[in-house]
């Protein structure tokens, strides 16, 4: 088996990890933000502030509590939106944090990573991406 990729993206070497530009669409609202690629998180989680900018009634979504590895929990609510990264677009459920102040938006496995095939050469800051069909 040989993998082929449509996109080669050079990301900045950041303390936050692999940070990608993200465009979220819900109804007539569009928010441009960033998301951190996180293979360890099951779902995409965005800040309360991003959810409000999208016009989501956050607490009307599907509730979920995330238990981060560092302890504690994060309450969030899921909504189906359109997500775009690196020119690729698809509808997905993202979770918005119940409370403001989430430091990073996370691009997780369900809703994002499982829709893509990726290759990574971290020592050169290169991310190879194609839509998985």
Image: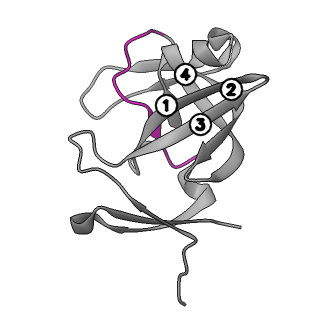
| Residue hosting label 2 | 79
Q: Return the residue at label 1.
A: 33
- What is the CA distance from the residue labelled 2 to the residue labelled 4? 8 Å
Tag 1–tag 3 contact (CB < 8 Å): yes
Front residue of this view, candidates 31 and 76 = 31
Q: Write the start and end of the magenta stretch as one range.
A: 99-110
Asked which secondary structure carries label 3, the reply is strand
- Count residues near mark 1 (Cα–Cα under 10 Å), then give few for <14, some for 14-19, many for 20+: few
| Tag 2–tag 4 contact (CB < 8 Å) | yes
Give the residue displayed 60% in from the left and 32% down from the top. 94
Q: Residues within 10 Å of mark 2 (few under 14, many from 20)?
A: many
Which numbered disc flags the more N-terminal residue, 1 or 2? 1
Image location of residue 100, percent across then percent down? 43, 10
Residue 96 numbered tag:
4
The one nearer the camera, 33 or 94, is 33
Numbered label attached to residue 23: 3
Whether tag 3 and tag 2 are in contact, CB under 8 A, the answer is no
């Amino acid at each position: 088996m040989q993998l082929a990729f449509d996109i080669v993206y050079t990301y900045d070497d950041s303390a936050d990890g692999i940070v990608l530009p993200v465009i979220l669409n819900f109804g007539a609202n569009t928010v441009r933000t960033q998301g951190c690629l996180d293979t360890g998180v099951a779902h995409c989680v965005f800040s309360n502030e991003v959810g409000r900018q999208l016009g989501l009634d956050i607490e009307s979504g599907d509730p979920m509590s995330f238990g981060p590895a560092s302890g504690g929990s994060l309450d969030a609510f899921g909504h189906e939106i359109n997500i775009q990264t690196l020119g690729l677009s698809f509808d997905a459920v993202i979770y918005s944090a119940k409370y403001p102040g989430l430091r990073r938006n996370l691009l997780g496995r369900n809703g994002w990573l499982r829709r893509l095939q990726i290759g990574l050469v971290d020592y050169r800051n290169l991310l190879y991406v194609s839509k998985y069909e």
